[in-house]
Structures are given as structure tokens and as C-alpha cells.
Image (cartoon, grey):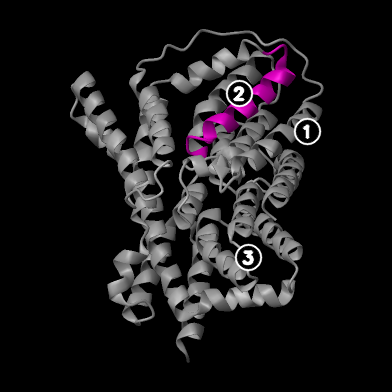
Amino acid sequence: MNTMVLALILFAAMYVLLLIFSEKRWIIALSAAVVFLALGILPIGSALRAINWNVLMMLTGTMVIVELFVQSKMPLRMAEGLLKITPNVQWAIVALSLFSGLISAFVDNVATVLMVAPVGLAVAKKIKTNPVPVIISIAVSSNLQGAATLVGDTTSILLGGYMNMGFNDFLWFKGRPGIIFAVETGALLTVPVLLWLFRKEKAWVVSGEKTQVTDYIPTVLLVGSIVLLIVASQFPNKPELTNGLICCGLAVIGVLYELIRRKEGSMIKDSLKAIDYKTLLLLSGLFLVIEGLTQAGVIDAIAETFVKVGGNSVLLMYVMIVGVSVILSAFIDNIPYVATMLPVVSSIASMMGNEPYLFAFGLLIGATLGGNITPIGASANIAGIGILQKEGYQVSTRDFIRIGVPFTLIAAISGALVIWLVWA
């Protein structure tokens, strides 16, 4: 058995196990990486270089800053201010959905749902309407705009790390509009969908008590991280770990500030709990496995298969990448999928004599939005449904796809079209 076939078999086995044992994904990915190293598919000397430390550091720092931001109650205060300017429940739901999308462009999608969903529940209870579609709308909107910025979602950070893109590059890249324009076009075009779905909700919104923000420093740190990432984007020859050091440095400042303010040693422990170590270990394992696949020739073989099916048509290949990404990410986690497919689409582009950006951006659009088709397609959806179940509400698959499918189709088609018009 040659090395490429063995690597492909091991990768397929790993992916099947990732699907079956979702709670043990980090263990499975690390175990697969150890097997790749033990069998010599990935040389041990290449292991440290295979891991994208900048991506891992960015994720770690952002997780801590976001946790401090949530604890400060600033997101709730912002959502309440938004509700005051809406004329009725229909527009309040639309506003909350757009607001969750705006927050998720800078904050993890699950954290966004945990912040905004309680406000949506409160609105639904005040006017005695079913909160299920309200929370679903908030969840799917948070999934959409995670792809808008470098720090919005793990998949965006993966793309930025692989393509060596800075924060500004999501706004304007190589003299052309960046991916944020495609995402925001999709977001705006979902507004008519939401207005139609909630066309009967015409009751007035009653304002409740104003949430008191306990601390403004986390907000300063979050905004500061965005500003510094933008500044760093102006220096193309900056050190490789620059973005990671920015995020981790501000996280350390935030933890030290809270430690001094609260005078509680447990603060450090609480901040460390905010770090999703399982996701970091999952990504580490995937980086190693994918490097092993690359060195074994599997990535090029998969790319060649795509090229054989798609031929020389860039349009057909683009539609295939976006379509397959939407369908697969409706059922599988988009983090390992995007991590695997980034080198594949780059190889496809190289074989076709093109730059990789069109296919890579299409991959991100499809993989990010496909999770909105099913209740299990994205962690934010699962979090939203969990909140509803705690409140005693049952969410059927039909309830979810009634909103998720039209939302996904409109956003994915329009977003992919913008990417094609700009980058084809």
C-alpha cells in the first residue's frame, strides 16, 4: 500500500469518527496526527511548522476578550438601545437578527447567541408570542456574518491564516472589494425574508429596565484589538505571529486589569475557563493531518478529481465548490471541512492557472452559510435551541428549516454572486 492511499484511508477514518463522536473531536484529530507521525507520513521535523501558531494565538486571545466583553453586559445594553428605535415586534425581530449578525462579525457566533437570545426571549414574552422563530432568526443571522471579518469566526481566522490576509484584507483586498461586501449583501437581502416570515407580528415593543454596564474596559479592549489588527494589516512584511500577539497581549491586559479591579485570584481561573481548549487542540491535530495529506500527495489528488469533473470551466468549478460546501456544512462541522478544503481549492486554482481567491472565498461563503440549513449544522444553532429547551419550548426540524432554508438560499446565492462578479 503506497503512502498516499494509506494517508487517504486514515483521513477518511478520522473524518467518520469526527462525525460519530462529536464530543471527542479533539481527541480523534490528535490521535490521527500521532498516527501520521508514527507511520512517517508526516516527518516529525515538520510537525511544529505544520501548526499555524498565529491562528491558535488569535483564537485564544479573542476568546478571553470576548468573555470579558460578555461579562461587562455591554452587548445586552446595546441590544436594548436598538429595541428602543424599532416601531413594532416585526421590526424588533429584524433588528435583533441584524444586531446579532453585527456582533458576530467580531465575536464568536455561540457567544453572540448567548448574548442576544435572552433579549429576544424577553421581547417574545412581553408581547406573548412564540419565541422559537425569534431565537432561530438570531442564531442563523449570527452564523451569516461570522465570515465578514478576520476575527468573526474560526473559519475566517483559518482563511486569513492560510491566505496570509490581515483584517483590512476582508474589507479591501488586492485592489478589489473584500469578502465583507458579499456577506453584507447577503445579510441585507435576508431582511425581506425576515419581514415576510414575521409579517403578522405588529404589536408594539415595550421597553424594560435598562441593563447597567459594569465595566467599559472590555469594550475598549475589543475595539482596540480590531483597530490594532487593522493597523497591522498595513505592514505586509510584519512578523508571522503579529496578529496572535496582538490578541493575546490585549487579553493579558484585560485579565490583569480585572484582577486588580476585583482583587480576586479566581479571576485568572475564570478567564482561563473562557478558552476553548478542545477547539484549539482539534485545530492543532487537523493542521498536522492536513500537512501529512499534502506531503503524501492526497490534496493534489483530490484537486485533480475536482478538475476532471469540472473541466476547464471556472464557473462550473466555482458553483461546485460553493454548492458542495453548502450541502456538506449543513451536516458536518465547518471547521475541519474548511481546514481540509483550503489547500484543495488552492491546488485546484493552481491546476487551472488561476489565483486561489475566487475559490477560497466561495468556500468560506458556502461553508459558513450551509450550517443554517439544519438545526445541527452550526454550534450557534445548537446553542439557540438549547436556550429554548431550557425555557420549556420544543423545536422541530420543520420549525428550523422554515427559516433556515430561505435564509440560507438568499444569503448564499447573493453572496456567491458578489464574489463571482468581483473575483472571477
Q: Are marks 2 and 3 in contact (CB under 8 Å)?
A: no
Q: With respect to residue 101, does 361 lie above or below?
A: below
Residue 60 is situated, as x and y percent measured from the top left of the image, at 35, 44
Q: Nearer the viewer, mark 2 or mark 1?
A: 1
The residue under label 3 is 354
Where is the C terminus found, in terms of image quarters? bottom right
Amino acid under disc 2: Gly
Residue at 71% across, 65% down = 317
Main SS of the magenta part reads helix
Of the image marks 2 and 1, the number of the one nearer the N terminus: 2
Label 2, on which residue? 120
> Which sits in the foreground, 284 or 224?
224
As measured in the structure, the alpha-carbon distance from the residue carrying label 1 to the one carrying label 3 is 36 Å
Q: Position of residue 54 (x, y in %)?
A: 36, 51
Q: Is residue 101 magenta?
A: yes
- Give the CA distance from mark 2 to mark 3: 45 Å
Whether residue 274 is visible:
no
**Secondary element at image label 2:** helix
Q: Which residues are magenta?
A: 86-109
Q: What amino acid is labelled 3 in the image?
A: Asn
The residue that disc 1 covers is 193
CA–CA distance in space, label 2 to label 1:
18 Å
Q: Position of residue 47 (x, y in %)?
A: 32, 69
Q: Is residue 262 magenta?
A: no
Q: Is residue 338 above or below residue 369?
A: below
